[in-house]
Amino acid sequence: QVQLVESGGGSVQAGGSLRLSCAASGYTYSSYSMGWFRQARGKEYEGVAAIDIDGSTNYADSVKGRFTISQDKAKNTLYLQMNSLKFEDTAMYYCAAASPGRSLTAIQALGVEGYRYWGQGTRVTVSS
């Protein structure tokens, strides 16, 4: 059974940094496209960053140049390095995995419909 567990969230002042981790288990990690999403209170899910099976990445315009998605396949772990955090980055952050072997287009990569498995989320709070 696929399991995704996020960690690394917390409270930080604007301009600060956090690194989120997503530990994956129950499947062959390298066979999955992965993504990070967030949901602020009262808002819809927003695709933040994604990494495809071939290692290509996609980012939301709002985080380009500030966030970096990466992975350690040996550790079955996905990361999201978040720098220069802003108040508007405050949200619950989720990692997600697509169906096994599925490669996502750039548009699919940042859309919730492209993903089959989801973690429980980790909260990020940025104070201004």
Image: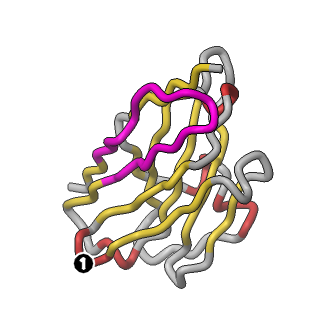
Task: Report the number of numbered marks.
Answer: 1
- Image check: 10 left or right of 51? left
Up the image or down, 118 lies above or below 57; here it is: above
Between 49 and 80, which is closer to the camera in this rendering?
80
Q: Nearer the viewer, residue 104 or 70?
A: 70
103 magenta-colored = no
5 vs 84, left or right, is left
Question: Is 14 inside the magenta-drawn segment?
Answer: yes
Residue at image x 53%, y 62%? 69
Of residues 6 and 8, the one nearer the viewer is: 8
Residue at the (72%, 59%) spot, across then down: 65
Residue located 61% across and 50% down the image: 113
Q: Is residue 62 left or right of residue 17?
A: right
Task: Please state which amino acid type lies under the numbered disc 1.
Answer: Ala
Q: Position of residue 59 (x, y in %)?
A: 69, 59
Residue situated in front as seen by the camera: 49 or 126: 126
Outermost residue on the bottom side: it is: 54
* Farthest-out residue, top: 42
Q: Position of residue 119 (x, y in %)?
A: 36, 42
Q: How would you rate the neighbour count of disc 1 (Cα within 10 Å): few for under 14, some for 14-19, many for 20 or more? A: few
Q: Residue furthest right?
A: 61
Quarter of the picture containing the N terminus is bottom left
Q: What colour scheme does the image use?
A: secondary structure
What residue did someone put label 1 on?
Answer: 74
Q: Position of residue 55 (x, y in %)?
A: 53, 80
In the picture, the quarter occupied by the C terminus is top right
Secondary structure beneath disc 1? Answer: helix
Q: Is residue 16 above or below residue 3?
A: above
Q: 96 above or below 103?
A: above
Residue for point 23% across, 70% down: 75
Q: Which residues are magenta?
A: 5-22
Q: Position of residue 5 (x, y in %)?
A: 28, 45
